[in-house]
Image: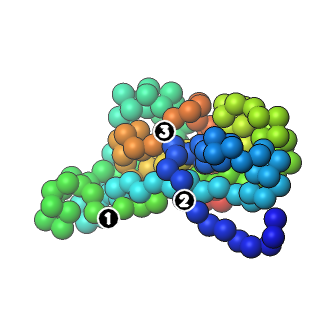
Amino acid sequence: MTGHKVLTTFHTEDSIGGLLRLLNMEIEAFLISSTVVSIVSQRLIRRVCRNCSEPVAPDPTLLRRLDITPNELSGSTFLLGKGCDKCRYTGYLGRVCVFELLTMNEMVKDAILRRQSSYEIRRISLETAGLVTLLEDGLVKAAAGITSLREVIHHLPRFSKLRPLYELRRLLGSR
């Protein structure tokens, strides 16, 4: 409210959890909705080793867990490292960051003022604020061969059904 930019960290599952943490700290909803501009949630997951990576077909079991079909992944290049001396035979070398950015538009602010549930705030954010969840960003990175589906499933929270890959690419401005 004073024009100062404040950056802070919270340990929450996702960006919506950051809003809830502020509410649980007994900060008035009107203060949150009028002062918070955005919340970023991030995770580091392992990057597929470029030295030993090979194209692979997505594991049908993993696709079922994500509730997506192989047809929905057309135009994707899934890679998996077979293991080499550079990656110590793990198939992974380095890390990649997966992001979720919640921007506060009027509908999200109104949901906070009405103290709606995290499910409702997430739904509104997905529909009106262009929110791409951690899992969705991870799926896009896996489909580009940057990480693996197994990494995405094991390390990122799932709250709702994934949107089609072409829609996620459009929202993220990627190919």
Which comes before the other along the chain, label 2 or label 3? 2
Which comes before the other along the chain, label 2 or label 1? 2
Name the residue furthest bottom: 4
Q: Residue at x 83, y 55 (%)?
A: 34
Q: Which of marks 1 and 3 is in front?
A: 3
Mark 2 = which residue? Answer: 9
Q: Which residue is drawn at 46% across and 54% down?
A: 43
Residue 1, percent from left and from top: 81, 65
Residue 157 shows which numbered tag?
3
Residue 85, percent from left and from top: 13, 65
C-alpha gap between disc 2 and disc 1: 24 Å
The number of discs equals: 3
Q: Which residue is drawn at 83% across and 47% down?
A: 30
Q: Which of 41 and 53 is in front in this view?
A: 41
174 displayed left or right of 34:
left
Dot 3, how many residues are within 10 Å of its Cα: few (below 14), some (14-19), or many (20+)?
some
The amino acid type of the residue labelled 2 equals Thr
> Dot 3 lies on which element?
loop
Dot 1, how many residues are within 10 Å of its Cα: few (below 14), some (14-19), or many (20+)?
few
Q: Which of 43 and 57 is in front in this view?
A: 43
Mark 1 touches mark 3? (CB < 8 Å): no
The amino acid type of the residue labelled 1 equals Gly
81 displayed left or right of 169:
left
The C terminus: image quadrant: bottom right
